[in-house]
């Protein structure tokens, strides 16, 4: 273990909180000196972009990965759900810290009646195809829009009336210590109402290929295994897949959602003689075929 460790992170309040949690784990377990270096990513620069239309993958990670490869730091700290399905050349995941609450929270304005009759008069702000597809099942008449910005910015915008509601990750709210907001109601949705994104609630450590053994032992084995399984489904669907797909593994039970195939749950024991890729293909085949529908990517935005 090196005596000094540099963590690379985005500069948003949530990203910094996750880097601080990572630093604490490393200091407590190894006694190493840990410092945090913040970088600005493309996704941070381009606040006017639609992440869905821009093809989201890598917009919040590429700059950290480039800095990691160049030796500017030792660990890139990510929200696991932000990572593309395949790691960049020369880099790999050492693992994840213990997962926080993976659920989504429906944050709505206090006004009564907005979501009656299937949400006919509601405007739900989310740029996530996964959240939009699942929310539409409950609120089939709602309209959807997007709000960019960090957690506090989006809460302020909803409270100010720019939308009727939005979705936020419970883990992010908890890490930021936000449990309420003036004029807003927080409603956690169950894993069967809103299947989380692969990796949601987990903090992932990306390292250079040769450094995996240095840092893997500080990660949580159960969370690291679950996130690896969830990411295997994303990888099988393909990096260019823009369908609304969700995957979450908890206590050897797999929760899946696909916009064309609906909700599914499967037993997924930790121990199996089959390779992970074979198990993933078998599950997808039971859902309706390995090559399940996958929407083409959107063109990049005009600059």
Image (cartoon, rainbow, N blue to C red):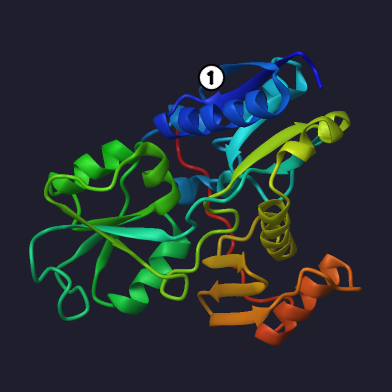
Nearest to the observer: residue 222 or residue 228: 222
Q: Is residue 89 above or below residue 190?
A: above
Q: Position of residue 117 (x, y in %)?
A: 16, 81
Q: Residue 156, how many percent across, how many down?
A: 20, 40
**Residue 248 location, quadrant:** bottom right
Give the vertical position of 95 relative to 297 (above or below): above
Residue 90 appears in the picture as rendered: no
Residue occupied by mark 1 = 38
Quadrant (top left/top right/bottom left/bottom right) for the N terminus: top right
Residue 55, given in percent of the width and then of the height, sits at 55, 48
Would you place residue 302 above or below residue 123 in this image?
above
Q: Residue at left 29%, top 37%?
A: 152
Query: Circle 1: is it few (<14), some (14-19), or many (20+) Cα within 10 Å?
Result: some
Residue at horizontal 8 percent and vertical 61 percent from the top: 111
- In the drawing, does residue 269 fall left or right of residue 36? right
Q: State which quarter of the image contains the C terminus.
A: top left
Quarter of image, res 177: top left
Q: Is residue 17 left or right of residue 92?
A: left
Taking the image as shown, residue 276 lies to the left or right of residue 247, namely: right
């Amino acid at each position: 273990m090196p005596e000094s460790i540099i963590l690379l992170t985005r500069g948003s309040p949530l990203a910094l909180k996750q880097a601080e949690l990572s630093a604490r784990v490393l200091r407590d377990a190894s006694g190493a000196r840990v410092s945090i270096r913040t970088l600005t990513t493309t996704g941070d620069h381009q606040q006017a972009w639609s992440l869905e239309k821009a093809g989201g993958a890598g917009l919040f990670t590429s700059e950290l990965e480039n800095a990691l490869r160049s030796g500017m730091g030792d660990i890139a700290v990510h929200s696991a759900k932000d990572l593309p399905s395949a790691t960049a050349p020369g880099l790999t995941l050492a693992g994840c810290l213990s997962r926080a609450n993976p659920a989504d929270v429906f944050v709505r304005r206090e006004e009564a009646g907005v979501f009656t009759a299937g949400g006919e008069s509601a405007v739900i702000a989310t740029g996530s195809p996964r959240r939009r597809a699942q929310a539409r099942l409950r609120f089939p008449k709602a309209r959807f829009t997007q709000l960019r910005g960090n957690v506090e910015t989006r809460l302020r915008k909803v409270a100010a009336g720019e939308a009727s509601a939005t979705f936020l990750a419970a883990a992010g709210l908890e890490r930021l210590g936000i449990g309420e907001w003036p004029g807003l109601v927080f409603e956690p949705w169950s894993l069967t109402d809103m299947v989380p994104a692969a990796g949601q609630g987990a903090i992932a450590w990306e390292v250079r290929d040769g450094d995996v053994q240095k840092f893997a032992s500080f990660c949580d084995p159960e969370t690291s295994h679950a996130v690896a399984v969830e990411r295997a489904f994303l990888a099988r669907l393909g990096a260019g897949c823009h369908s609304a797909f969700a995957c979450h593994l908890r206590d050897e039970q797999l929760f899946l959602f696909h916009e064309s195939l609906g909700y599914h749950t499967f037993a997924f024991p930790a121990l199996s003689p089959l390779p992970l890729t074979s198990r993933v293909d078998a599950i997808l085949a039971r859902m309706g075929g390995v090559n399940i529908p996958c929407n083409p990517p959107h063109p990049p935005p005009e600059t």
